[in-house]
Image (cartoon, rainbow, N blue to C red):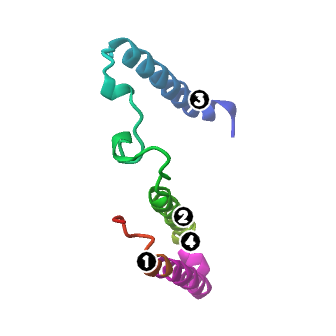
Amino acid sequence: MSLPAYFPILLLTILAGAFAVVSIFVANRLTPRRWTDVKVEPYECGITPEEMPERERFPVKFYLVAMLFIVFDIETVFMYPWAVEYKALKAFGLAEMGTFIGILLAAYVYVWRRGGLEWAE
């Protein structure tokens, strides 16, 4: 490949970078700055500070649900390469993906039975 073949990629990169910089600059200049007490007080995962007495431990349930979402979300990313190469992998690829989905389903059932997906305490 010659260097002029990469010109559209370079142009797109420059345009994307310029759009990001201009968007941040314009948003910074046009945004109203009216700070209120509600805007500056701490807020964490749906629990306002007034609901929690001091020295009470913060419930880790929110973090557990977030971590489970990330784990199961990342696991689905591994299905994309398999889908792209499905015809080349044939029966072996199908068996491997079946095993992978089976393990993923077993983990999901385990978390479900242990109450990891229950939101209420």
Mark 1 or 2, nearer chain start: 2
| Mark 1 or 4, nearer chain start | 4
Magenta-tinted stretch: 85-109
Residue at 39% in and 26% down: 40
Residue 102 x %, y %: 52, 84
Q: Is residue 14 above or below residue 89?
A: above
Q: How far apart are labels 1 and 4 at the CA level?
A: 27 Å
Label 2 neighbourhood size at 10 Å, few (<14), some (14-19), many (20+)? few
Residue 99 among those drawn in magenta:
yes
Q: Which circle, 1 or 2, is nearer the viewer?
A: 1
Q: Alpha carbon of mark 4 to alpha carbon of mark 3: how far?
A: 30 Å
Looking at the rendered structure, the kind of residue marked 2 is Val
Indicate the position of residue 70 as horizontal and vertical percent values. Answer: 51, 59
Give the number of the disc on residue 10.
3
Dot 4: element: helix
Task: Write down the residue under mark 4.
Answer: 82
Q: Does the magenta stretch include residue 54?
A: no
Identify the amino acid type marked 1.
Trp
SS category of the residue bearing label 3: helix
Q: As drawn, is 3 to the left or to the right of 100?
A: right
Residue that lies at the very extreme toward the right in this rendered image: 2
Given residues 62 and 28, the one toward you in this image is 62
Task: From the top left corner, tell me how far across and down residue 81 is, in percent.
Answer: 57, 66
